[in-house]
Amino acid sequence: MITVVAALIEKDGKYLIAKRSTGSEDVLGKWEFPGGKVETDETEEHAIEREIEEEFEMDIKAIRFLTNNVCEYPSKTIDLRLYECQYLSGEFHLHDHSEYKFVDKGELLNNDLAKADIVLAEYVKENI
């Protein structure tokens, strides 16, 4: 199982999702809470901060763990772990995504989300 962290970043009452332009067929072209794999000997909090810096050139701070979803894709099984994060600085520069947007929590499920992100979006809609 692969541990993957995802960032819940709020701005003006809306939440960041981004559309994958790289990666496996499982997620290519799908919307997701951005993030990435946790490296060996790395905390989940450090991993999400590093991944957002690499993917968007933005600095964030992981605040707290919210929920997770173990999801089986044809090529792998992931444990997707969602963290509430605070934006600190930086401007969006897309590297692994073709676009991004901030949406109301009630609109999250109206997007073509990656399979693993659907449960996380349901959690956000009901609990945040």
Image: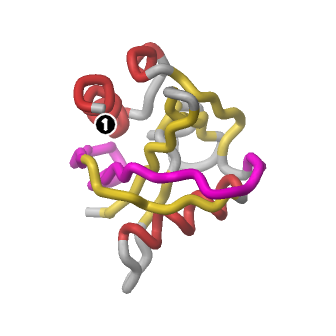
Q: Give the extent of the magenta segment.
A: 67-94
Q: In which quarter of the image is the C terminus?
A: top left
Classify residue 5 by image quadrant. Answer: bottom left
Residue 8 image point, x, y percent: 44, 44
Classify 10 Å Cα crowding around label 1: few (below 14), some (14-19), many (20 and above): many
Q: Residue at x 24, y 30 (%)?
A: 127
Looking at the rendered structure, the kind of residue marked 1 is Leu
Q: Quadrant of the N terminus?
A: bottom left
Q: Is residue 1 left or right of residue 37?
A: left
Residue at the far bottom in the pictured view: 41
Q: Residue at x 50, y 32 (%)?
A: 15
From what the image shows, is residue 116 above or below residue 68?
A: above
Residue 124 image point, x, y percent: 32, 31
Residue 52 colored in magenta in the image:
no
For label 1, the residue is 120
Relative to the observer, which residue lies in front, 55 or 85? 85
Residue 72: tell me if it is visible: yes
SS at mark 1? helix
Residue 77: tell me if it is visible: no
Magenta span: helix, strand or loop, mainly?
strand
Q: In this view, does 80 lie to the left or right of 23?
A: left
Residue 73 colored in magenta in the image:
yes
